[in-house]
């Protein structure tokens, strides 16, 4: 399919290592994709679902030991250890290549190696970047065909250039003990072995569009961030864009596709989704920050998605979707997951492939779930009823506000605004969130997750903070920076804020602040709304006192946080910029007053 010698030589080398029986180029055609689906159905890798109810949809189950990203086995392999930093796992490149070569050697014997040329961003556009993924998994091919722009046009766009990310993925034996997700930012290379799960194997996503891209962004003067992008349309037709960083499985997809509360809909407000997970941001000629979504689909969390929480996502998954690790409803040949509705299927297979008895399902005991808590849907962005008209605009959209947020039962108020870019960078750097099922390990533990990028920065976190500060100096018309927390709970552990579509009420305050249209109250941590400025029209059970409670800043718990932040900065190491230590000291002083 190409005469590009860099591509050909590299594929030859990888084929010599992995020894596949055959090599097949993915051309992006529907005929080829259909043939691969048929083959995956024949081998049992995928199950074809009810063609009437879920046209062209499939179900896949991963190995039971392979259901989430594995941060402990994810490595950044730079020549110097300091360049990967303390937050990342590090291996010397030569050592890592050697170690993984042993695992890859002969691992594709009896299998086919698929060559997937893909573009992150609109093919051929100024800001797009090209990758080629070699994989022995049809499931990966079919997911990449949804999540990226893949096929012949990409290899044509590459021409004879050497500027592409070289990705090698092999399922090998899906051996947990030998699972490695390794990045070689200095070589534009990613090697992933012994997994078949999303974030570990769809190399365009976290591996390229965040880890490698963040490294490139620092070198080239732009940013790759774990952010959704949405547009809010005002009744007069004007649209303002917000990008927001939340850790995995904290509601990015829901926020990106939110449906405005009824009273706002009646006034003519609309919300448009540009992206739900990743934003590439650069300074435009007009001095504003512009964002593109480099992906072409959504790899969303299924459990909890329903026609109230996210009707747009649900509609998006109604055709041409791959479901992973959800419940198989045998009577209807459809899918189900916890939180979809109150009618679990009676005749069903759980995510592990075993018969599932819904009567034994106990909400509080995750081990009784039919769908894995990190089960997913892979769906085309263009399926989404609220997809933005600018989704595929190569120029992207101008960002008015950047929003950080995490899952915090206490401490963080519903919303606050930073003072300026430097203080906003500080606010992002001290983000914390309770861990979720998106990564292997304990769930519900509060950990520092700066800019929601802790697992995704492809270099030293201290340098990443410095890059943020540096970018601020280069954006004359910078977005304002905010922090939100939808997850504050009362003494009984119930969420106080209704969340979902009602989050729009907070976003409108944020945008009003960006335009200087509304006042705020200064607190030690930043500016919070006057309670009466959060519109609570039509909200059941939420009074102005609830809003007051949600906006309180408890100095005691913030002082505890300060101590914890200082420990975290120490862990990040000596590349944390002095400006952030100044911000921390100033915060402490304000809290102690
Ligand atoms: O599994 S993914 O990394 O693709 C999704 C996520 O954890 O955000
Ligand atoms: Mn994510």
Image (cartoon, rainbow, N blue to C red):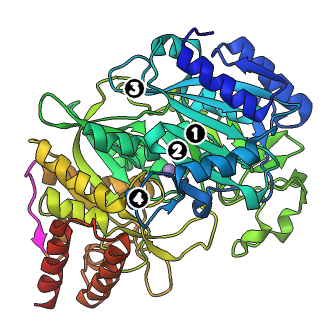
Q: Nearer the viewer, residue 310 or 38?
A: 38
Labelled disc at residue 452: 4
Distance, label 4 to label 2, CA atoms, is 15 Å
Judge the density around disc 1: few (<14), some (14-19), many (≥20) Cα neighbours within 10 Å. Answer: many
Q: Earlier in the sequence, mark 3 or mark 1?
A: 3
Distance, label 2 to label 1, CA atoms, is 5 Å
Judge the density around disc 2: few (<14), some (14-19), many (≥20) Cα neighbours within 10 Å. Answer: many
Q: Secondary structure at mark 4?
A: helix
Disc 4 beta carbon < 8 A from ligand 2?
yes
Q: Residue at x 76, y 21 (%)?
A: 23
Q: Look at the numbered discs 2 and 1 and tell me whether their residues touch, using CB distance below 8 Å.
A: yes
Q: Nearer the viewer, residue 435 or 366?
A: 435
Q: Earlier in the sequence, mark 1 or mark 4?
A: 1
Q: Is residue 556 magenta?
A: no
Q: Earlier in the sequence, mark 2 or mark 3?
A: 3
Q: Look at the numbered discs 1 and 4 and tell me whether their residues touch, using CB distance below 8 Å.
A: no
């Amino acid at each position: 399919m190409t005469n590009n010698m860099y591509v050909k030589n590299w594929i030859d080398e990888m084929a010599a290592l992995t020894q596949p029986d055959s090599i097949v180029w993915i051309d992006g055609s529907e005929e080829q994709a259909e043939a691969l689906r048929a083959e995956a159905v024949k081998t049992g890798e995928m199950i074809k679902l009810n063609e009437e109810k879920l046209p062209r949809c499939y179900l896949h189950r991963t190995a039971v030991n392979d259901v989430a990203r594995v941060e402990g086995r994810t490595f950044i392999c730079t020549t110097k250890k300091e360049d990967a930093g303390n937050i990342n796992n590090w291996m010397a490149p030569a050592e890592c290549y050697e170690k993984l070569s042993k695992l890859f050697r002969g691992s594709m014997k009896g299998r086919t190696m698929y060559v997937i040329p893909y573009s992150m961003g609109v093919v051929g556009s100024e800001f797009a970047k090209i990758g080629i993924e070699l994989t022995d998994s049809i499931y990966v091919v079919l997911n990449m065909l949804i999540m990226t722009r893949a096929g012949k046009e990409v290899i044509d766009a590459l021409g004879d250039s050497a500027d592409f990310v070289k990705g090698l993925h092999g399922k090998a034996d899906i051996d947990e003990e030998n699972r490695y997700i390794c990045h070689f930012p200095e070589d534009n290379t990613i090697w992933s072995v012994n997994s078949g799960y999303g974030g570990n194997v769809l190399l365009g996503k976290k591996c390229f569009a965040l880890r490698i891209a963040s490294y490139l962004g620092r070198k080239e003067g732009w940013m790759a961030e774990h952010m959704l992008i949405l547009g809010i349309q005002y009744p007069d037709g004007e649209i303002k864009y917000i990008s927001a960083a939340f850790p995995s499985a904290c509601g990015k997809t829901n926020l990106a596709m939110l449906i405005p509360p009824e009273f706002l809909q009646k006034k003519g407000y609309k919300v448009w989704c540009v992206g739900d997970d990743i934003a590439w941001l650069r300074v435009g000629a007009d001095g504003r920050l512009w964002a593109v979504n480099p992906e072409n689909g959504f790899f969303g969390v299924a459990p909890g998605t329903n026609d109230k929480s996210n009707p747009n996502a649900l509609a998006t998954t109604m055709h041409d979707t791959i479901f992973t690790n959800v419940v198989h409803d045998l009577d209807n040949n459809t899918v189900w997951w916890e939180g979809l509705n109150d009618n679990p299927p009676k005749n069903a297979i759980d995510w592990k492939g075993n018969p599932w008895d819904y009567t034994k399902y106990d909400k509080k005991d995750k081990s009784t779930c039919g769908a894995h808590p990190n089960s997913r849907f892979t769906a085309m962005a263009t399926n989404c009823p609220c997809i933005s008209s600018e989704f595929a605009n190569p120029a992207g959209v101008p960002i008015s506000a950047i929003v950080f947020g995490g899952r915090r039962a206490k401490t963080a108020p519903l919303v606050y605004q930073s003072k300026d870019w430097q203080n906003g960078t500080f606010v992002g750097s001290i983000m914390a969130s309770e861990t979720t099922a998106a990564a292997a390990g304990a769930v519900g533990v509060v950990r520092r997750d700066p800019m929601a990028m802790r697992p995704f920065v492809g270099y030293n976190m201290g340098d990443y903070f410095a890059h943020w500060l540096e970018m601020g100096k280069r954006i004359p018309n910078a977005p304002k920076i905010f922090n939100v927390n939808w997850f504050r709970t009362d003494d009984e552990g119930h969420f106080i804020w209704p969340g979902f579509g009602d989050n729009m009420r907070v976003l409108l305050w944020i945008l009003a602040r960006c335009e200087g249209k509304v006042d705020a109250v200064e607190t030690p941590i930043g500016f919070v709304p006057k309670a009466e400025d959060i519109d609570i029209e039509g909200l059941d059970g939420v009074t102005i006192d609830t809003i007051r409670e949600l906006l309180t800043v408890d100095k005691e718990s913030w002082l505890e946080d300060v101590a914890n932040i200082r420990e975290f900065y120490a862990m990040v190491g000596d590349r944390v910029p002095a400006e952030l230590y100044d911000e921390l000291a100033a915060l402490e002083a304000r809290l102690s007053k």
